[in-house]
Image (spheres, helix red, strand yellow):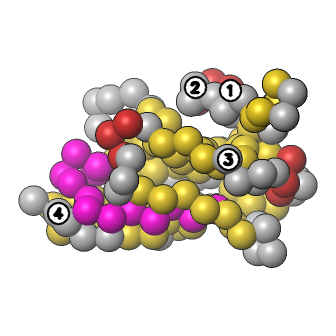
């Protein structure tokens, strides 16, 4: 039974930091790409950051580059999203999701389309106050 458990959200002031965690079970950790998505009220779900657990390849959406860092720890089947310099615009429910690691030769094909991800966590709310 595949499960993704997201945690770590909360209320923080602008400029502050949070670390989100996504602990997964039910599949081989290294065979999947884990992505963090977010959905703000009235907006579509958007991809924020992604990591291939097979080789550590990462991807960041432009608006979060330099402020967010994604990492993974295969010993505890957990992916982390360290967030710094948070802005009110970062307020959203954050979800982690999993997709099989697809390759073109040796290069991982990371998709930012939430429809490509078949497994989802329950979401954790991040609120950034101004």
Q: Is residue 123 left or right of residue 42?
A: right
Q: Secondary structure at mark 4?
A: loop
Q: Residue 29: horizontal and vertical position, in percent?
A: 83, 57
Between circles 4 and 3, the one closer to the viewer is 3
Residue highlighted by disc 3: 57
- Does any portion of residue 109 appear in the rendered image? yes
Q: Secondary structure at mark 1?
A: helix
Q: Name the residue at 61% across, 62% down.
A: 71
Q: Name the residue at 38% across, 36% down.
A: 62
Question: Mark 4 or mark 3, which has the lower sequence index?
Answer: 4
- Does any portion of residue 34 appear in the rendered image? no
Give the CA separation, mark 1 to mark 4. 32 Å
Asked if the residues shown at circle 1 and circle 3 are in contact, with their CB atoms under 8 angstroms apart, the answer is no
Asked if the residues shown at circle 1 and circle 2 are in contact, with their CB atoms under 8 angstroms apart, the answer is yes
Residue highlighted by disc 4: 14
Q: Is residue 97 above or below residue 10?
A: above
Q: Is residue 30 above or below residue 42?
A: below
Question: Mark 2 or mark 3, which has the lower sequence index?
Answer: 3
Residue projecting furthest to the front = 106
Q: Residue 54: horizontal and vertical position, in percent?
A: 81, 51
Residue projecting furthest to the left = 130
Q: Which residues are magenta?
A: 79-91
Residue highlighted by disc 2: 113
Q: Name the residue at 24% across, 70% down.
A: 16
Q: Residue 100: horizontal and vertical position, in percent?
A: 81, 38
Q: Which mark is residue 116?
A: 1
Q: Is residue 20 magenta?
A: no
Q: Residues within 10 Å of mark 2 (few under 14, many from 20)?
A: few
Give the CA separation, mark 2 to mark 4. 28 Å
């Amino acid at each position: 039974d595949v499960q993704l458990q997201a945690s770590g959200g909360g209320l923080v002031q602008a400029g502050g930091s949070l670390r989100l965690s996504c602990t997964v079970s039910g599949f081989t950790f290294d065979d999947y790409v884990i992505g963090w998505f977010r959905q703000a009220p009235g907006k579509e779900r958007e991809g924020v950051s992604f990591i291939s657990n097979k080789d550590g390849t990462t991807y960041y959406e432009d608006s979060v580059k330099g402020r967010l860092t994604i990492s993974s720890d295969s010993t505890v089947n957990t992916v982390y999203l360290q967030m710094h310099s948070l802005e009110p615009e970062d307020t959203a429910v954050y979800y982690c999701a999993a997709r099989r690691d697809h390759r073109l030769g040796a290069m991982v094909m990371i998709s930012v389309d939430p429809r490509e991800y078949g497994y989802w966590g329950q979401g954790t709310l991040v609120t950034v106050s101004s």
